[in-house]
Amino acid sequence: MVALTSKQRAYLKSLASTMDPIFQIGKSSLTPEVTAAIGESFNKRELIKIAVLKNCFDDPREIAEMVAERTKSTVVQVVGKKIILYKESKDHKKIELPL
């Protein structure tokens, strides 16, 4: 997990604003399979957006914290039912964070 400065967080939010969610968390909430798939997707991309569907009754902030902990990523933002996660890639580094 990386501690992000407010400037870095704002930069990542701006990148994520044009992204579509690539995962949806529904009524079965956070399953080990979903967690594993999110973890694997960090191999290809550094920034991931997740949608929490209306039929999921868990708190999106709690889901974000659990996913971040299990995938060793960082929660950039939770807005309503959207979660944005960041994990720096050692092999496919594309995002250069501002200092």
Image (cartoon, helix red, strand yellow):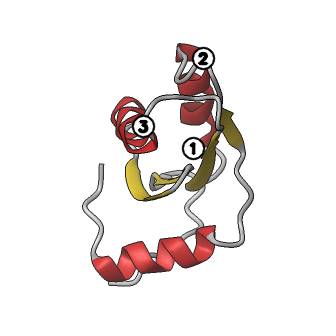
Residue placed under numbered mark 3 in the picture: 59
Rendering coords of residue 30 (x, y %): 52, 23
Give how far across and how far down residue 91 sits, in percent.
55, 51
Q: CA distance from mark 3 to mark 1?
A: 23 Å
Q: Amino acid at mark 3?
A: Asp
Q: Residue at x 60, y 74 (%)?
A: 15
Describe the element under mark 1 as helix, strand or loop: loop
Residue 48 lies left or right of residue 90; in this view the side is: right
- At horizontal 72% and vertical 45% (from top left) the residue drawn is 22
Q: CA distance from mark 2 to mark 3?
A: 13 Å
Q: Which residue is mark 2?
A: 28
Residue at the image point whose x is 40% and y is 83% from the top: 98
Total of numbered circles in the picture? 3
Question: Residue at 37% across / 51% down in the picture?
Answer: 74
Q: Which mark is residue 42?
A: 1
Kind of residue at disc 1: Phe
Few, some or many residues within 10 Å of mark 1 (<14, 14–19, 20+): some
Q: Residues within 10 Å of mark 3 (few under 14, many from 20)?
A: few
Query: Could you tell whether 9 is left or right of 51 in the image?
Result: left
Between 7 and 59, which is closer to the camera in this rendering?
Answer: 59
Mark sitting earlier along the chain (2/1): 2
Instruction: Select label 2 or label 1 by which is in front.
Output: 2
Q: CA distance from mark 2 to mark 1?
A: 22 Å
- Please say if 9 is above or below 93: below
Up the image or down, 76 lies above or below 73; here it is: below
Say if 58 sits above or below 43 in the image: above
> Is residue 26 or residue 2 the one in the foreground?
26
Q: Earlier in the sequence, mark 2 or mark 3?
A: 2
